[in-house]
Image: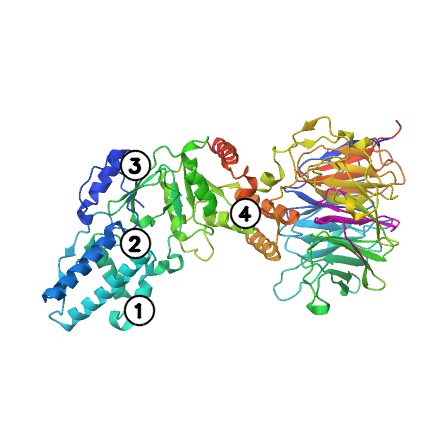
Amino acid sequence: MNEISSSSNANNYAGAVLDSQESSGASSADYDSVHVVSVVGNGALARIESLLEAMVDAIITGDKISVPYRSVRASRPGQLQGPPSGRQTGIVRFPGRTIQEAKKFDALFRIIELSHEALLSGSLITKRNIYYQNPELFGSQAVVDVMVNNLAFTLGVGRGDLNIASRHQWAVATAKGLISGPVILVNRDGSVIDCGLSHNTGILLPPISEIQSIGFHAAQWVLVIEKEATFRTLAAAQYAKTSRAGCGILITAKGFPDLATRRFLSVLHSMRPGLVIFGLADFDPDGVSIVQTYQNGSRRLEHENEATVPSLRWLGVRSNDLLSSGESPVFDDEEDQESQAATSLGSSHLLERSDHHRPAKRPKLSGFQNPSETVLSLTLRDRRKAADILRGICSIDQPSNDELDQTQELQRMLMLNIKAEIQAVDNYGDLSTWLDDKLCAGMDTGQ
Amino acid sequence: MSKQYLTAHTVDQAHPADIFSLAPTPSTLISASGSSSLRIHDTTSPTYPLAQTISNAHKLGCHHLATASGPQTGNIFASVGFGGDAKIWHLNPDSKQYELQWEIPTVGDSGKGDVWAIALSADENFLACTTSDGRIHVWDLTAKEKIQTYETGGGRGAAGGGGSFAMAVDLSRDGRLTASGHENGGVYVFNNDAGRMVYSLSGLAKPVRAVAFSPGCKRLAAAGNAGIIALYDMEHGEHVGNLSAPGNRPSWITSLDWNDTGDYLLSGQLDGKVKVWDVARGACVATHSETDSALWCVRWLPPTERALGPGMGKGERFCAAGASRSLSFYREATGI
């Protein structure tokens, strides 16, 4: 991760952008004032289309069709920074001088076509998928991998910009993480993403391998949110800038976190260890599981390194958030001793609230209340899942404090037999007051 | 006229996690929590010292305990873990320590149990266990076999189930009746001799977290999220009254217990309050709120024949425990 530099001042990231000029071929611009927002493709689509146009022109004029194609000399993984040291300049023609060249053109054209389609539809295609489009033509998966990399290199874009995912990413192919807040992401191809623009309600997280540097500005905290809807609401309200806890960053992976989002968080954390990272999830077994995944990774992808944030703090929703609320007054029942219970027969009285009792003289705020109406009962599946997560934690020899916390919350969840969504703690749709309190308290204890 | 109860003793941090269940024997109180250990406290001494700790009883923590009520009991108790595993413990008469006697076998090959609430019969020979799909299994602990399954769902026989989660269960002291309380608000009473349901008691509509037969087996008390205690007559299955406190949002009731004479009911609430109800008058006669965190269990201690020790008196005692992780013992104030 050494290629990613933490830079909060404008000169630094402008410098980073200039570094990548050579390979991107982008025209120079005034980087001090322009925060380039070109998320989709970074011009890859335009470049591919101009390639295709050139081919059509060549067919019309009867010239030989050619595609520029330069190959990156095999470089060690993790050494992708800067312009690759060695390259072969060249073009592939059709019909070429040899059958190999014709085949190569065919294969290349197929990849360009698939990438074009993916870019147009906004979908992602994996290298594996490309190979299976025509295994005979490509011969082997390795050929596809090399050609895709070279094509991206030739066009001066990242592989991701072609909407082509690595074949190992197939399970998490579609990037789904969103980010919002006063943060600037500088991509390797020179594009700059400002995540803090006011009209943004979330920007798709680029793959971490495409990010050159991150400008943090004044961000002090990161809030990872399970639900996209909650994220969008907070982003639209500019919560990242207006929070009482100071500036921060909002991130969501839209449910169960994908590897790309977790990697991004992990990088954020390693770049800025002082940044306090909080997790906000539903009060249900899946919510606990999501928090666990951010902290410790998923069991299926145990081989994935650098995708965990063990220090992520579980902000909520917790049982105490549901049980205690200072919102509505509860009557002091000191007068219990004189009170007479309803002793009448019939079930019609059972549900009747005790309105006929004399109004309490001293309404007071109670610390502990019933969960509000927004809670739901656990389903059979929920109860089983909760027990399974408990089993997982209890098989650990020395559970951490976080894991003991999770144990307690799961046990209370099972005892209460309730679950609740994040919305259960908001105030008529406004989560900011609750979040302010939680974040401030969390930041205080964190120092 | 109210009754006076005093805080007699508090065992702070009795467990390293929420205390979910209590079960008294004539001379001890067993407590269970979110940790794996069970603890047995001596209730014959004013400091309620620890008599035994059973380590690793339930790896995922323990949420229900059951002892039998009545004299000459305490030879056996049962416990249920969050993994759905149920264990039977018996008192070794020589060492005076509880030892594992038996574990209720799990259904299927998964190795995962499905037991939630339990109740032990007065003769300590039958254990009623509820399931997440609304069944009640009754086990013969001597023969170690299941002798009865009550269905509350639509299904019948082996293909049954589909009922509402059974959150509470009790057996009457005379051994004749079984009662269950369900997530959908249903309360069912079964006749153990006939092996069938005799009453389906509606009325609470909200999840029922506790059911308890009076010692004389004439009444059944049920309570839960409705925040009131419903009383049913067991002669004809009629609803005969409610016990409720004023206030427009009564707290969820998590636990109920009759005292030995059947005159008083003890209730524990999610808001930390413990209440004593005079059943005949239908009134709350004492409220204690030492904690504002959830109470998971409240239990009377069995009456004692003699004064136990200095400062302990002969009056009735009860204990409350929950999210505070402490055991709070109360005793009746006498001689006023």
Q: Mark 2 highlights which residue?
A: A160
Front position in the image: A130 or B155: B155
Local secondary structure at mark 3: loop
Mark 4 neighbour class, 10 Å CA radius: few under 14, some 14 to 19, many 20 or more:
few
Name the residue located 25 percent from the left edge and 71 percent from the top edge: A137
Chain at tag 4: A
Q: Earlier in the sequence, mark 3 or mark 1?
A: 3
Instruction: Identify the magenta region.
Output: B199-228
Local secondary structure at mark 4: loop
Front position in the image: B303 or A20: A20
Q: In the image, is residue A187 above or below residue B156? A: above
Q: Amino acid at mark 1?
A: Gln
Local secondary structure at mark 2: helix
Same chain under badges 2 and 4? The reply is yes
Same chain under badges 1 and 4? The reply is yes
Q: Amino acid at mark 2?
A: Gly
Name the mark nearer the viewer: 1 or 4: 1
Q: Mark 3 highlights which residue?
A: A7
Can residue B29 be seen here? The reply is no
Q: Earlier in the sequence, mark 4 or mark 3?
A: 3
Residue B224 highlighted magenta (yes or no): yes
Q: Mark 4 highlights which residue?
A: A398
Name the mark nearer the viewer: 2 or 3: 2
Local secondary structure at mark 1: helix
